[in-house]
Image (spheres, rainbow, N blue to C red):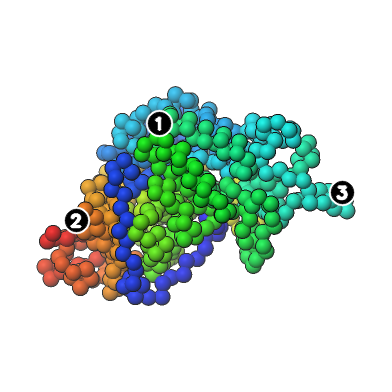
Amino acid sequence: MTDQPAAATDPAAATDAAAATSADSTATSADPADWRDGVVYQIYPRSFADHDGDGTGDLAGILDHVDHVGPDVLPIDAIWLSPIYPSPGRDLGYDVTDHTAIDPLLGTEDDFDRLVAACHERGINVILDLVMNHTSDESAWFLASKASRDGPFADFYLWRDPSGWDADGKPLPPNNWVSFFGGPGWEWVPERGQFYYHTFLVGQPELNWRNPAVEAAQWDMVRGWLKRGVDGFRLDVFNAFLKDADLRDNPVIEGGSPWSRQDHRYDLDQPDFLELIGRFREIVDEEAGRMSVGELFTGGTPTAAAYTRGRHIVFDWSLMESPWTAAAFAAGIDLRERAYGPDLWPTIALSNHDRERQATRLSASVGRDRDPDRAAIAKAAAVVILASRGAPFLYYGEEIGMIDVDIPREEIVDPPALLAGPDFPWYDRSRCRTPMQWQPGPGAGFTTAKPWLRLADDADTRNVAVQLADPDSVLAAYRRLLRYRRTAPALRHGAMTRLPSGDPDVLAWTRTADGQRLLVVVSFVGQPRQLDLGTLAGGRWRAIVGSHREPAAVAPDGTIALRPDEAIILEAADG
Ligand code: GLC
């Protein structure tokens, strides 16, 4: 999760000048057992497909649609399932009561094993979302911890005595830490006569990772999933796991909300955190070919790069926070390439379950948030995410250009959105979590019941069935690009070098690996543009695939006439 609301990214003053100096990168991950350069598709299980007809998506529903992410429709390398464990659902699964089991709301243990087997039959890896920073306040660990200051679970959470008592005899919190979800960070528990800390909701008490028993219990859980055939893990808010051992006050700074008015020196990014990641990777590496991705919680690209280690990759938000301009994307790409350098492998995501969907955000960022512009931008963005260096993470519905849905207040299901106010700005995440749109008609093929969260108004026209039949659709673009990416080593793991395009609204870069050299050109405007590819990249080029059904052709003189919002991948014509 990133800071909310989205931080503005400074557009590069001179896109091309920056390109001329942008560092070459040569990182590859050419080991076939190392699939961190594959494409990951994030599924929010409650919203993907409802098999049992209760209005909420489930694992059997994902199984019903597993071929959607298989080689014939969207050839991806892995699905990431947002949390599937038992949970009271206060943070919709990010508040876990038992990390070793399947939430009955989503299905059975057997459903999970069948889903993993079906994915593996199709060559799809399965990534689980591990919420190891906190548990639900209804977990057995927390209930035992709350009940007694003695016993094996007493120190599983961040319990502290009050720092004093006010004039009314009320306990004062141990330090100045606040909750990211608004309000105080400390919750008083009279039974124990102590406070516990929670970065998120009161119902998400923070685990005490400085207790070796907590770490051991987490690694046991990880081993259990590895044995069950899971191929990788996403680590929720992983840089929050460790806190300062003395729980010192955070320094107070300028900011727009209680959270951003603190320098999070003592509750995030502790100096010994990298060692913890090393110990985690040792467990994961007990089984061959497994990956992990850390969710960077409120941190910049250099921090993401600093936590990247071999097969442990990290989300970086620079492109997710960029408006749809060539200057902003150039700045984001250059920042990433500089921070990661040639040896570290980045990730790239334009949407997830915490942020506005790319089809909404990018087009709105330039005041073009109506079709056909919106769909055209979504298709060009598909080229960016699938042709940049790094592991692409797609979010369910992105492939059909799903947009955010206006949710009336009484239907909001995102708890912090209900706390939002002038001192606590918040994007209602219900907007980007609406049910997948599979086909026209009631329930959109998602459910036969009333969906747990309202469907988009455009579900009859924007859905998988309609777009599968339309070669100009957003889905058709993602399919073409994904299919091509599979065949192109330079896209999968090649170095990336940005080139001056000669046009402030067009970006160009090359990708090179295994003797293959590709050129990518992306127009960020709804007007035609003319480029001279010989001057831009040298040599002769052939357009292969892009945002449009047929990419614009390169003229015999080496120029290309890009149509509005056109993005193209080209191969060297003479080599
Ligand atoms: C991560 C998740 C977000 C969740 C939070 C607390 O940022 O992506 O959805 O609310 O962690 O677990």
Q: Nearer the viewer, mark 3 or mark 1?
A: 1
Provide residue 161's location: percent of width, then percent of height: 77, 46
In the image, residue 233 above or below residue 427: above
Which element carries disc 2, helix, strand or loop? loop
Q: Is residue 381 left or right of residue 101?
A: left
Q: Is residue 413 left or right of residue 44?
A: right
User: Of label 1 and label 2, which has the lower sequence position?
Assistant: 1
Q: CA distance from mark 1 to mark 2?
A: 35 Å
Q: Who is closer to the viewer here, 393 or 498?
A: 498
Provide residue 87's location: percent of width, then percent of height: 58, 34
Q: CA distance from mark 3 to mark 1?
A: 54 Å
Q: Nearer the viewer, mark 2 or mark 3?
A: 2
Residue designated by label 2: 515
**Residue 369 seen anywhere in this rendered image of the structure:** no
Mark 3–mark 1 contact, CB under 8 Å? no
Query: Callout 3: 10 Å neighbours few (<14), some, many (20+)?
Result: few
User: Of label 2 and label 3, which has the lower sequence position?
Assistant: 3
Residue designated by label 3: 169
Query: Callout 1: 10 Å neighbours few (<14), some, many (20+)?
Result: some
In the image, residue 232 above or below residue 269: above
Mark 2–mark 3 contact, CB under 8 Å? no
Q: Quadrant of the C terminus?
A: bottom left
Residue at the spot 78% in from the left edge and 36% down from the top edge: 191
Three-letter amino acid code at disc 3? Gly
Three-letter amino acid code at disc 2? Gly
Q: Is residue 471 left or right of residue 276?
A: left
Residue designated by label 1: 229
Query: Callout 2: 10 Å neighbours few (<14), some, many (20+)?
Result: few
Which element carries disc 1, helix, strand or loop? loop
Three-letter amino acid code at disc 1? Gly
Residue at the spot 26% in from the left edge and 62% down from the top edge: 510
Which element carries disc 3, helix, strand or loop? loop
